[in-house]
Image (tube, helix red, strand yellow):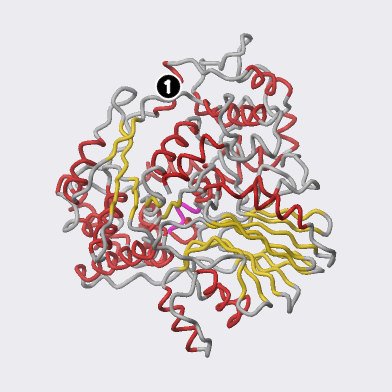
Amino acid sequence: MSGIAGIVRLDGGPVDRALLEKMADFQAFRGPHGRRVWSKGSTGFVHTLSKLSDDDAPAPQPATLEGKVWITAHARIDAQAELIAALRGRGREVPSGSSDAELLLHAYQVWGERCLEHVIGDFTFAIWDSREQRLFCAVDHFGIRPFYYARVGATLAFSNTLDCVRLLASVSEKLDDTAVGDFLLFGYYVDLDRTIYSDIRRIPRAHRLIASRDRVEVRRYWEMVEDDELDDSDPAAFVEEFKLRLLNATRDRLRTRNVAVFMSGGLDSTLVTASAVKAMRERDKPWTITPFTTVFRELIADDEEVYARAAAEHLGLELHLQSGDDFALFDWASPGHRRPPEPPDDPSWGDYIRSMAEVARVAPLVLTGWEGDEPLRAWLPGHWRRLIRSGRWARLFRDLSWYVRNEKGPPPIGARTALVRMRRLVPAALPDWLAPDFARRAGLAERWAEFRYVQARAYYAGSRQRYLERVPWAGVFNGDDAGWLGFPLETAHPLMDLRVIAWLARVPAIPWCSNKRLFLDAAREMLPEKIIDRAKTPLSGDPAEVVFRRRSIQLPSGVRARALQSDYVVSGALFDSTGAVRTDQPLDSRAQAISLFAWLDKGRNDTMSHDARPNDAEAKPCQEAL
């Protein structure tokens, strides 16, 4: 939750202290428990502190150990005992109870740039090394914590809040055509370093940035590598190993005794909740875990409440229900709502913000099970062809036999499946509402074809590592971040722990990936049979599409005008002559375009003291709860 920001003059000129103070004020919503600005010569750092609870006592930042190397960080460093032991083994005196930022400084002092090989967790940070006159910044392995920066002339400004970087007067409002095209086509940016603004970039996941007088370089520091499958000859021990890894990941994230959790009636989130309950029961102080479940009673058929309630009762928790029925599409575009830093992909973004604010009033930390099953989902599609290509016939026969016996049918490896896969590799036409001139200028036809082909190839190539490199996790994590929410709420993903993901990426496909059998077996002693036996079923429909068909979309009049003035879409493709959203086509093919124009219209009179900054009505209730 904490806010970080900074400015470095690469030409050695003096940093603008007044601008640093302004950045600190802007980041107040992220850090209600402290504010500090440090500057010296050509460099200045900002930090606004947010504590999860009274038990959480991080050291003030910006911080230093000896006055030569300074840090501003939003970080949670995991496996601290192991890291401290490694540092002490290198002769470093590391006091017990060192803060996350101090551990990062110790690691940098010992290993320099290679410190990222020794730290894990969710982090984004900047280190100024006055000895080398160098800025060293990094983002965690999965990009859970954001880092935005802009280099304009000899000035480099950064923050974990995009709109904070925009405070720099020299940072233009010009949009990036490639980013706009990606958003319209996919709902996110294919290039992980892009933002909607031409002048502002973000450090991609598992990358670090180094800036000095003569260079600004961004480079990857970690990637998944192909590795041998794990030994599962002892299935019971194998399942216990997974449970222990998830438990340790959950323990590291529980830095407050008051926690919320997004718990559907499915397997992933209930497994995370059960691990959190087990970790909390190890403690000798009172604790509270509040599960939140979204339920639909009108828009679509939904039995989520039945399973979520069964899990909550089994774990001794009080379930908190949130209605998914009552929302208006694109209501965040109306006056009185905060403008998000970039166009949101979700047409019900306003309802999402309200639900997150409700969670923040209950607890400062919320756990999720989102996205953690990707390594299991990614493995089966190419597993059979991988065995055939490598000539592992005994293994192929064994796995086929198991699949037919347990899944009551043959696996999808026949000619029909191959034909379907080939069709998926053939690029579809661009949406007909995209303006041809813009599509040509941004190279969208080539980008569309290449992206679809690469995604499909990665999915069916038989390599979880290649597939996981393509998963657009940043789009999910954006919505968790305080810079998007407008109020402090820490979201943690135990299943996205590096120790868990890297291990899951080596799990044998059969039997553990089929219907997520590993998760099922891990949950057997932790959750009720109703959860274990539940068939995996998606939502019976798209709530946003149902709302689109039932209720009119009320948008400010300027949104249609923006669309008509734009060269991004064909005139009249989104709105009819009355200004209403056309209903003769599904919403899902045009939601991103409507969102883009609603976002542009909302920013037409944007000032950095109004729309871009979180308003008091949204931030204050959450801060009081914390």
Residue 466 relative to residue 442: left or right: left
User: Which residue extends farthest left?
Assistant: 529
Q: Is residue 40 above or below residue 459?
A: below
User: Considering depth in this image, is 492 or 98 the residue closer to the camera?
Assistant: 98
The residue located at (83%, 67%) in the rendering is 12
Residue 462 relative to residue 570: left or right: left
Q: Is residue 61 above or below residue 607?
A: below
Q: Disc count in the image?
A: 1
Q: Is residue 102 above or below residue 620?
A: below
Measured from the top left, where is residue 103 in percent x and y? 52, 74
Magenta: main secondary structure equals: helix
Measured from the top left, where is residue 420 in percent x and y? 43, 40
User: Considering depth in this image, is 589 or 424 the residue closer to the camera?
Assistant: 589
Q: Which residues are magenta?
A: 458-462
Measured from the top left, where is residue 569 in percent x and y? 67, 26
The residue located at (36%, 51%) in the rendering is 369
Measured from the top left, where is residue 475 in percent x and y? 52, 46
Reading the image, the residue beneath label 1 is 547
Q: Is-magenta flag for residue 320?
A: no
The residue located at (40%, 60%) in the rendering is 54
User: Which residue extends farthest top?
Assistant: 578
Q: Is residue 609 above or below residue 545?
A: below
Please, what secondary structure does the residue beneath circle 1 have?
A: helix
Residue 14 relative to residue 614: left or right: right
Query: What's the amino acid at mark 1?
Result: Val
